[in-house]
Amino acid sequence: MIDEISNNKLLPLPWLRLESKIDQNLQFARKQDNSTEELSEEFHRTLFSLLPYQKITRRHKVYCNKRGYYELKTVSLTLGDVLGFGETFDHFNAKATVTVYPEIIPIEDIPLPSHSWLGNIMVRRWIIDDPFVNAGVREYSYGDSMNSVNWKATARTGSLQVSKRDYTSDHHLMIYLNFDETEDIWMPIQNALLIEKGISYAASIAQESISKGINTGFGCNSYLVEPFGEIIENNVKESVRIEPKNGKHQLTQLYDTMAKLSMDRSMSFKRFLLEDMNNRLNTDILIITTLLTANIQENIRLLEVQGNKIEILMLTDQLNDYKNMQGEGGYYAQ
């Protein structure tokens, strides 16, 4: 974070203090190791003393300790007079935001089931170059065939260039995250850290699958924080669905959406799955969940009848628990 202030007058400013409210999850470097504050927001204070026509810039390193969307709304300014007997106070709108993406975990550290088909669709053998879709040119790499050389681009750039083909994939992957911990939708979420781990898993798997050229989407029965969430009916906020696509723009949209997820639910997960019955066909679906009820399993069965292939990744506090959770039909349950 950069504080920048200047004195454009002939008189000096003996002291000037800037104050702004900062969420506790954005911690300044000097407080990283010894901060014991429990407040949702803390004041960041900076003191200046300026000579005539002097400009001062200060840079502060800020640690982003938690996924989320953070707003800086106002900055307060207190100015002392030359004699030191009085002070003047004012505040200004200073709209600024910080979006912290979920933590990305190495794919090998995610406890996917040993027989998971997800590992199979993560490898290049499922994806072939489409000779009819040109995605531009790139520099020649060792192993490229000579019939892929783009001679016009080579002549234009002066270095060997090859045509870059887009990928054709048989797979469309949807990653679903269940925010339910119990069947009672009105109960607040008790283990937020476990849900946060699920969000990190979803972001990490999306990053890996998109990097392999697989169209990837995301959905959950939570909603976006203000001012992004929309109310659909009866004061119910719209749940989150991003249809499978590929490319850097899609990955950025997934990261941004996951960063803005509220730690709450818009509807039960069984209802969330029910909404997919009419428009989800022939899709690979990975469900990340802490809960697997009979109603959820019935909706999963109905989705499978429509040609969808579904995998379950259970969230537990102990990673070793995953080794003993294989259930009937390939499902994993506690």
Image: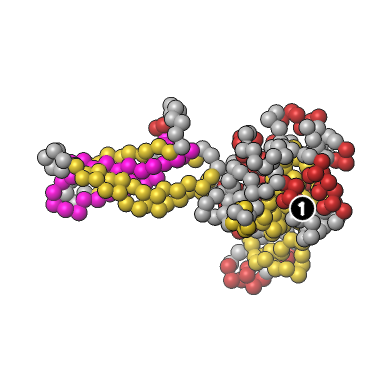
Q: Quadrant of residue 276?
A: bottom right
Picture quadrant where residue 155 is located: bottom right
Question: Residue 136, percent across and down?
Answer: 65, 67
Q: Evaluate whether residue 242 shows in this view.
A: yes
Instruction: Choose between 231 and 43: the one closer to the eye.
Output: 231
Residue at 70% x, 46% y: name it: 268
- Residue 32: image x %, image y %? 45, 32
Of residue 186 and residue 68, the one placed in the foreground of this image is: 186
What kind of colouring is applied to the model shown?
secondary structure
**The residue stretch that appears in magenta:** 1-29
Q: Quadrant of the C terminus?
A: top right
Task: Classify 10 Å Cα crowding around label 1: few (below 14), some (14-19), many (20 and above).
Answer: some
Relative to 277, 75 lies left or right: left
Q: Position of residue 26 (x, y in %)?
A: 46, 40
Residue 245 in percent (x, y) is at 69, 59
For numbered disc 1, what is the local secondary structure? helix
Indicate whether residue 89 is drawn in magenta.
no
Q: Is residue 57 above or below residue 228?
A: above
Q: Using residue 116 as the reference point, say whether residue 62 is left or right of it.
A: left
Give the labeled residue for mark 1.
Answer: 274
The answer to whether 290 is drawn above or below residue 298 in the figure is above
Q: Residue at x 40, y 53 (%)?
A: 95
Residue extending furthest toward the front:
234
Q: Is 10 inside the magenta-drawn segment?
A: yes
Tell which of 293 and 253 is nearer to you.
Answer: 293
**Quarter of the picture holding the N terminus:** top left
Residue occupying the point 71% across, 54% down: 216
How many circles with numbers are drawn on the protein?
1
Q: Which amino acid type is shown beneath numbered disc 1?
A: Leu
Predominant SS of the magenta segment = strand
